Amino acid sequence: MSLEYDRSSRVAFLYLLYLAVRRGGYEFGGVRGWAHHDDIRWYTQDHFGDSLTRLALMGFLDREDMRHSRRQKPNWIYRIAERGVESIRNLEGVEPPPIACPGSAPAPGEARPVYVPAGALLAVRALRLVSANPTPSPLLPNEPGWRTHDELTALVCPPHEDEPEWKLDMLIGDLDELDAPAAWRAEREPRKPTRPRYFSNGDLMWLVRAGMAQRFGTIPEYGRRHTVLYRLTPLGAAIVPLEWREPTAEAEGDKQPEVSPDP
């Protein structure tokens, strides 16, 4: 196997080809099929290290820097290039469907989308809802627009579902499960990677470090916990985040390459 087509490269090629053919992922340059390193790792459940950077420098992948104005290091998104499609054609022995080539990047001064991680993007949506109706928080009655993590979660995230019985038994160490473990194992469904439906305090802190949100900690009363609130900044209101789209169902005439990313 050649250097540019080791196992991790093969997984990345096939997944990015799948995104481009099914018109999923992020849109940039008039085409979809773009994905961030974290997206590729999340959906393929594989690790790539610096493989994506190496493949982009060798011309097998296209990449674009989608960093925000406060970030010093590049934040790349990737898409399979024609040379990558050619590698699949030669090494897999299949004929991939044709994919569109990306157009030119926005000119200087034009609006350019920004990459925001999936969890932080949910938090941005919640903060923008609050900003559109900036009623004061009871914790800060003279400062409109501030909300806690739990208040923001309630705006955009579904209610948390009850844990299945098998998982509760595992958490509490139910000894009965040792006698007949097959019953609860049968309830477990294979994990299918999906976009996050919730966001954490860490996602909110990502926005704070990026200058898209403000953070304020209230002074706790005796015996009470420290409360942290967040509010959208002008930068957070102005950015145009990249929006992920799941790949569409197989279109008529399209044929997904009959190959597996497993070695």
Image (cartoon, rainbow, N blue to C red):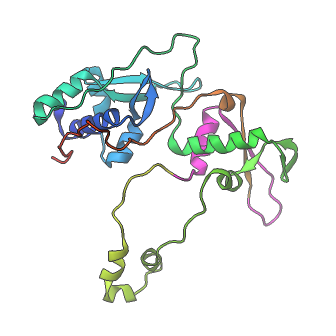
**Is residue 165 within the magenta segment?**
no
Residue 176, horizontal then vertical, whole percent: 39, 89
Task: Give the percent coordinates (x, y) of residue 9.
Answer: 23, 35
**Magenta stretch contains residue 210:** yes
The residue stretch that appears in magenta? 197-225
Q: Looking at the image, which residue is at 17% across and 36% down? A: 6
Left or right of 30 in this view: 179: left
**Compared to 230, does 100 lie above or below?**
above
Drawn side of residue 178 relative to residue 168, left or right = left
* Image height of 215 relative to 113, above or below: below
- The single residue placed furthest to the right in the displayed view is 142
- Residue 88 in the image: x percent, y percent? 17, 32
Q: Is residue 3 visible?
A: no
Q: Residue at x 83, y 60 (%)?
A: 221
Asked which quadrant contains residue 215, the reply is top right
On the question of residue 220 being in view, the answer is yes
